[in-house]
Image (cartoon, helix red, strand yellow):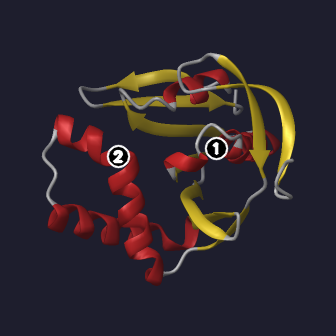
């Protein structure tokens, strides 16, 4: 029996690009507040520490400071993702004069590959398309979500040693 917050999707894709059966979990977004700092840091540990350790070094104090700086810089554009009545992720979406930017999307590993990230990013893409603007996202080179971004139509327009920069340009 399915939980009330789930509905059958049919086929979906996992991070490795393979199709699989999936159930989508309904979610809501709420405004982010400074009291969410510890949640966001804990999520960063779960989702990004493995990669940050690979290319830099991990230092809790430095990463907590970076998390607080990110929160301070992007608070008005940051949303906490809630599913099953608990905080399960965070996302940042910002509009500039020329483009939209997906600044952050982190979802707890227990809730990844359940359609939440796909749905959120698809809504961001729709907003960019409706406004005839470019939408960009920067991600770590080895981020498994890269497959998701490319599947949704993002193309690489730049890269460096640690990151790739992807876009869909509706302004053309």
Residue 10 locus on image (x, y percent): 84, 28
Residue at far bottom of view: 35
The spot of residue 108 in percent (x, y) is 51, 52
Work out whether residue 71 can be spotted.
Answer: yes
- Answer with the quarter of the image where residue 68 lies: bottom left
Please name the residue shown 51% across and 80% down the image: 33
The quarter of the picture where residue 21 lies is: top right
The answer, for residue 105, to whether it is visible in the render is no
**Which mark, by number, is residue 29?**
none
Q: Is residue 136 left or right of residue 20?
A: left
Which of the pair 13/67 is nearer the observer?
13
Q: Which mark is residue 48?
A: 2
Where is mark 1, residue-wise? 117
Q: Tell me which numbered mark, 2 or 1, is placed earlier along the sequence.
A: 2
Label 2 secondary element: helix
Q: Residue 74 location, x and y as percent?
A: 47, 67
Residue 105: % across, % down: 53, 50
């Amino acid at each position: 029996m399915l939980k009330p917050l789930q509905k059958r999707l049919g086929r979906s894709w996992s991070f490795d690009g393979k199709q699989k059966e999936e159930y989508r979990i309904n979610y809501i977004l709420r405004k982010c507040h400074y009291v969410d700092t510890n949640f966001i840091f804990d999520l960063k540990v779960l989702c990004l520490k493995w990669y940050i350790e690979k290319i830099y070094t991990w230092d809790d104090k430095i990463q907590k400071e970076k998390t607080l700086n990110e929160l301070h810089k992007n608070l008005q554009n940051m949303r906490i993702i809630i599913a099953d009545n608990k905080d399960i992720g965070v996302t940042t979406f910002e509009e500039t004069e020329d483009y939209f930017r997906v600044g952050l999307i982190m979802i707890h590993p227990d809730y990844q590959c359940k359609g939440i990230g796909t749905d959120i990013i698809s809504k961001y893409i729709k907003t960019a398309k409706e406004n005839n603007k470019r939408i960009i996202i920067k991600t770590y080179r080895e981020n498994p979500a890269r497959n998701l971004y490319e599947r949704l139509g993002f193309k690489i327009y730049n890269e460096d040693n640690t990151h790739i920069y992807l876009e869909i340009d509706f302004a053309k």
